[in-house]
């Protein structure tokens, strides 16, 4: 049984990714942070869906690329992660990254949150970005072209 479920909200198409490779990657990133992977659910959606989730559960009235619900216990990371493919695309354009790289960055961003890495406090953003880059490098070392994976 896969511990990671990849699904799309009704209005969104599931990205054409190699989900077996991504599952291995997520497990390796978790292990690098002394964690093990428990049940994870990725829900790919559009901006309207993530806005509804953001308002309903977090009382935030704005778009975002990912919302992570943390169900982790001890060393086991577990959670649901909503990813807006619309915001991923606009963020990629804004920072000059490929859509593929930005999508992979966001996919691992949620796992890094579940591993205890934050990005809201002073200096935390830079720490998160360093962990994201290390994770992307790990994926590249697995033979994946992180800038052209789709």
Image: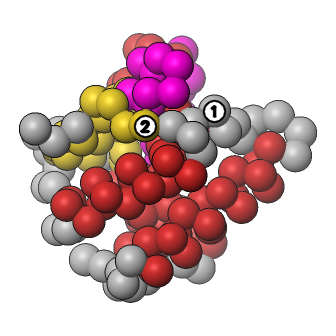
Q: Which mark is residue 116?
A: 1
Q: Quadrant of the N terminus?
A: top left
User: What colour-coding does the image apply?
Assistant: secondary structure
Q: Earlier in the sequence, mark 1 or mark 2?
A: 2
- The answer to which quarter of the image holds residue 21 is bottom left
Q: Percent position (x, y) of residue 50?
A: 37, 35
Q: Residue at x 28, y 30 (%)?
A: 39
Q: Percent position (x, y) of residue 36?
A: 43, 37
Residue 21, visible in the rendered structure: yes
Q: Residue at x 82, y 34 (%)?
A: 121
Q: Which mark is residue 52?
A: none
Mark 2 secondary-structure assignment: strand
Please give left or right for residue 34 compared with residue 57 in the image: right
Residue labelled with disc 2: 36
In the depicted structure, whether residue 73 falls above or below residue 79: above
Q: Percent position (x, y) of residue 2?
A: 16, 42
Q: Which residues are magenta?
A: 59-78
Mark 1 secondary-structure assignment: loop
Q: Nearer the viewer, residue 37 or 10?
A: 37
Mark 1 burial class by Cα count in 10 Å: few <14, some 14-19, many 20+: few
Please give left or right for residue 147 compared with residue 128 in the image: left
Residue 67 drawn in magenta: yes
Main secondary structure found in the magenta portion: loop
Residue 98 drawn in magenta: no
Q: Nearer the viewer, residue 52 or 44?
A: 44
Please give left or right for residue 109 compared with residue 118 in the image: left
In the depicted structure, whether residue 141 falls above or below residue 92: below
Q: Which residue is outermost to the right? A: 122
Q: Quadrant of the C terminus?
A: bottom left
In the depicted structure, whether residue 101 falls above or below residue 22: below
Q: Residue at x 28, y 54 (%)?
A: 23
Mark 2 burial class by Cα count in 10 Å: few <14, some 14-19, many 20+: some
């Amino acid at each position: 049984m896969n511990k990671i479920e990849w699904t799309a909200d009704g209005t969104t198409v599931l990205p054409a990714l190699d989900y077996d490779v991504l599952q291995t990657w997520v497990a390796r990133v978790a292990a690098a942070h002394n964690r093990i992977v428990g049940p994870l659910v990725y829900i790919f959606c559009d901006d309207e869906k993530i806005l509804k989730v953001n308002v309903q559960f977090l009382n935030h009235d704005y778009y975002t690329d990912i919302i992570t619900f943390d169900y982790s216990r001890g060393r086991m990371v577990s959670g649901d992660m909503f990813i807006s493919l619309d915001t991923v695309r606009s963020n990629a354009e804004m920072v000059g990254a490929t859509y593929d790289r930005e999508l992979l960055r966001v996919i691992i961003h949620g796992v890094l949150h579940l591993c205890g890495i934050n990005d809201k406090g002073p200096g935390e953003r830079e720490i998160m970005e360093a962990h994201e880059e290390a994770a992307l490098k790990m994926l590249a070392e697995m033979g994946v072209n992180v800038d052209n994976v789709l």
